[in-house]
Image (cartoon, helix red, strand yellow):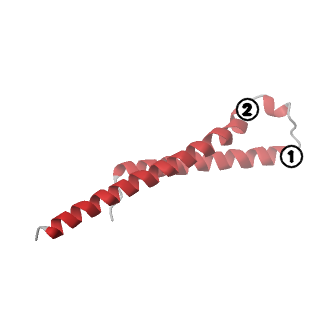
Amino acid sequence: MTIHRNERVIAYMIAAIVGLSILAFLAVIIGTYSGLDAKDFASGIWPAVYTLPLIGLPIGFVLIIVLLVISARRRAREARTASTSTSKR
C-alpha cells in the first residue's frame, strides 16, 4: 500500500489545522482559568485565538472526509486494475 502525495498533503493539513485549533482551545481555557473575562478576550490576539477552533475544527472534519473519499477511490481503482491484470493471464 502506497500513500500518494495528495493524501500525505491532506493528512498534514489535517494535523496542522486540528493541532492549532486544539492549542487555541487550550489557550482560551487557560486564559479563562487565569482570570480573563469577556472584555479581555476582545483585544489583542485573543479574538483570533478565540475564533480559530470555531473555524479550524469543522475544516479539519471536512478534510478528514475528503481524505477518506480520496483514499477509497484510489484503493478501488487499484483493486480494479489488479483484478483486470490477473484475469488477463
| CA–CA distance in space, label 1 to label 2 | 17 Å
> In this rendering, would 29 be left or right of 22?
right
> Where in the figure is residue 59, as x and y percent of width and height?
57, 42
Residue type pointed to by label 2: Pro
Label 1 vs label 2, nearer the camera: 2
For the N terminus, the image quarter is bottom left
Q: Which mark is residue 47?
A: 2
Secondary structure found at label 1: loop
Residue type pointed to by label 1: Ser
> Where in the figure is residue 4, as x and y percent of width and height?
34, 54
> Where in the figure is residue 2, as x and y percent of width and height?
33, 61
Residue drawn where x is 35% and y is 50% of the image: 5
Q: Is residue 41 above or below residue 81?
A: above
Residue contact between numbered discs 1 and 2, judged by CB atoms under 8 Å: no
Q: Find disc 1 in the rendering and name its residue.
A: 34
> In this rendering, would 83 be left or right of 14?
left
Residue drawn where x is 67% and y is 48% of the image: 23
Residue drawn where x is 86% and y is 39% of the image: 36
Secondary structure found at label 2: helix
Q: Which mark is residue 18?
A: none
Q: Is residue 77 above or below residue 45?
A: below
Disc nearer the start of the sequence (1/2): 1
Residue at the front extreme? 87
Q: Is residue 30 above or below residue 89?
A: above
Q: Residues within 10 Å of mark 2 (few under 14, many from 20)?
A: few
For the C terminus, the image quarter is bottom left
Residue drawn where x is 84% and y is 44% of the image: 32
